[in-house]
Image (cartoon, helix red, strand yellow):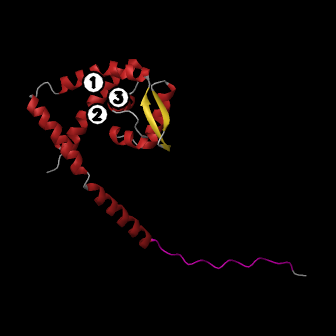
Amino acid sequence: MYRLSTSFPYLLNRVGVRMGELFARRIASFGVTLPMYRVMAALWESGDQRLSDLSTVTTTEISTLSRLIGEMKRKGLVTRSRLADNGRTVAINLTAKGKSLVEELMPIAIHFEEVAISNFSASDIARLKVVFQDIYDSLGTIEPEIAATKASAKSNAKSKRKITPSRPRPKPRTKDT
């Protein structure tokens, strides 16, 4: 029988939410949020990222990420600039201030990871990371299923619409002469 409290997605999310909430509370005194940290860490690994690439890496919707990047730019943590080879593409990079801040926050992130995995062997941890990546990749096979379900629902909704006959409009009244 299915039980939420023992289901894999629930347990995985529970760990992620707990770790994220604790980390967010820990870094709040630095004036950044968890999503900001994720963006800075992603840019630290690889700069000159487009918004769509950052969205994928940080699992943040583009519209939300765009507002976040704007806020980070106002704080002096990131820059936006047009790429020389493609004037329509905006590259996002860390400023010196952003790089310094993320380098100050990384030891905290490492500490959180170390505490979380302290009961596991190095080989267990390596295997878990592979398993998590495999699970993530496997979930990609659900995308076509969702698209097909969405298309089917849209098609059913169109076919179920009732066409109501139009009522004749009353003729405008005219004054008798």
Read off the residue under disc 3.
44
Secondary element at tag 3: helix
Which of the two discs, 3 and 2, labels the residue nearer the N terminus? 2
Q: Main secondary structure of the magenta part?
A: loop
Q: Around disc 1, counting alpha carbons within 10 Å, would you say few (fewer than 14), some (14 to 19), or many (20 or more)?
A: some
**Which residue is at 27% across, 19% downward?**
107
- Amino acid under disc 3: Trp
Q: Is residue 177 above or below residue 56?
A: below
Query: Do labels 1 and 3 touch, CB within 8 Å?
Result: no
Which residues lie in the magenta part?
A: 161-175
Is label 2 in a helix, a strand or a loop? helix
The quadrant in which the C terminus is found is bottom right
Which mark, residue 139?
none
Q: How much space separates mark 1 and mark 2, taking CA atoms?
A: 15 Å
Residue 151 left/right relative to 19: right
Residue identified by numbered label 2: 17
User: Could one spot residue 4 in this view of the protein?
Assistant: no
Count residues near mark 3 (Cα–Cα under 10 Å), then give few for <14, some for 14-19, many for 20+: some
Amino acid bearing label 1: Ala
* Residue 134 left/right relative to 149: left
Q: Is residue 98 magenta?
A: no
Q: Nearer the viewer, mark 1 or mark 2?
A: 1
Q: Is 167 one of the magenta-colored residues?
A: yes
